[in-house]
Image (spheres, grey):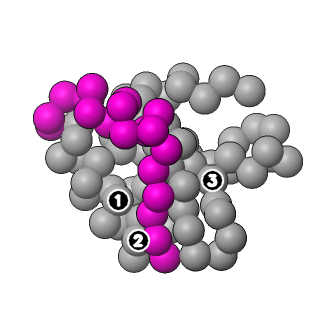
Amino acid sequence: MKIKETNSFRKSYKALPAVTQKKAKKQFELLLVNLFHPSLHTEKLEPKHNNIWSFRIDKSYRVIFTFQGNEIILLINIGPHDIYKK
């Protein structure tokens, strides 16, 4: 599986504290091995027909993503848990 990033994701990632970036890198490694690893808390967000997913970096931050085909994960944004607005 490959990971791609949007410009919005890159900008938000660069603005994170260094400690959060370090945690994020660890979670990205888990994501590549097992998309549904228990520590990621991967979930499909409402409304489900939008096919938008999230996984946790820690209790304060999460990554919003979607799929492009069967082998690519597109990282949309990273930030506080309320970053995804329907």
Q: Residue at x 29, y 48 (%)?
A: 24
Inspect this view and state whether residue 18 appears: yes
What residue type is disc 3 on?
A: Thr
Q: Position of residue 4 (x, y in %)?
A: 47, 58
Q: Is residue 79 above or below residue 75?
A: above
User: Which residue carries the number 2 mark?
Assistant: 32
Q: Nearer the viewer, residue 34 or 52?
A: 52
Quadrant holding the C terminus: top right
Q: Residues within 10 Å of mark 3 (few under 14, many from 20)?
A: some
Q: Residues within 10 Å of mark 1 (few under 14, many from 20)?
A: some
User: Which residue carries the number 3 mark?
Assistant: 66
What residue type is disc 2 on?
A: Leu
Q: Secondary structure at mark 2?
A: helix
Q: Position of residue 55 (x, y in %)?
A: 49, 49
Looking at the image, which residue sits at the far left? 18
Q: Are marks 2 and 1 in contact (CB under 8 Å)?
A: yes
Q: Nearer the viewer, residue 33 or 69?
A: 69
Q: Position of residue 38 (x, y in %)?
A: 45, 62
The residues colored magenta run 1-19
